[in-house]
Amino acid sequence: MEVTIQERSLSFRSEYEIETPGSYYFAQKAIFSFPAKIKVQSSDERILANIQGRFSFFRERSDFLLSDGRVFHFWCEKRWKRVFDCEGNKVSYRLYGHKGLRYSIFQDDRQIAAFTKNRVVIGKGNQYEINLNDDADVIVIICMVLAINSSEDDDDNATVTIDVGSIGPEEKPFDERWQPS
């Protein structure tokens, strides 16, 4: 399954258009919210999830409150190596940042998704191309990507930015052979 998250380039607050096979979602960050508050909605404006940033001096932390009552806690485990954990509803995920603009997501030590960020950004227009397994929880993965964008890439309002991505160490190398199932 392929999902695209496109941040609107010229917007006062962060707004995102999210395309999945057969569905269209959008998300928006509350104006002047610190920590971040992002609402994810379906095309008929039903709220699917709320992302509540939590204040922390050293590491990003967020809670994902899904419309079905599930709650997930997302936090940065290793800042230098860009490792994030997400737990809730008896499920755990680990998100790894890799060299360049690539990320991968694992559920219980099994890769379920990989995504890339665009290199050339006009305005705020970050774009994420996500490939994920058909049985993966799409809303949780969208929330993880939005939380990463909010914590790492949300403060840039330049006209044009060339993003070289991460050049530091990585916890786990990116698996070029992985394909969604």
Image: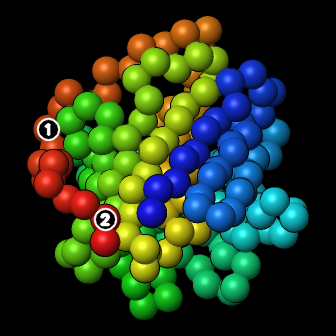
Residue drawn at (31%, 28%) of the image? 165
Q: Which mark is residue 100?
A: none
Pinpoint residue 116: horizontal percent, then vertical percent. 37, 41
Crowd tier of the residue under label 2, counting other residues whose Cα lies within 10 Å: few below 14, some 14–19, many 20 or above: some
Q: Nearer the viewer, residue 24 or 69?
A: 24
- Quarter of the image where one finds residue 163: top left
Which residue is disc 2 drawn over? 180
Determine the image quadrant of residue 123: top right
Total numbered circles: 2
The quadrant of the picture occupied by the N terminus is bottom left
Q: Where 98 falls versus 13 (above or below)?
A: below
- Say if 148 sits above or below 136 in the image: above
Task: Say which amino acid is labelled 2.
Answer: Pro
- Describe the element under mark 1 as helix, strand or loop: loop
Pick whichever, 58 or 170, lies toward us: 170
Residue picked out by circle 1? 169
Three-letter code, disc 1: Pro
* Helix, strand or loop status at disc 2: loop
Q: How is the image coloured?
A: rainbow
Q: In which quadrant of the rendered image does the C terminus lie?
A: bottom left
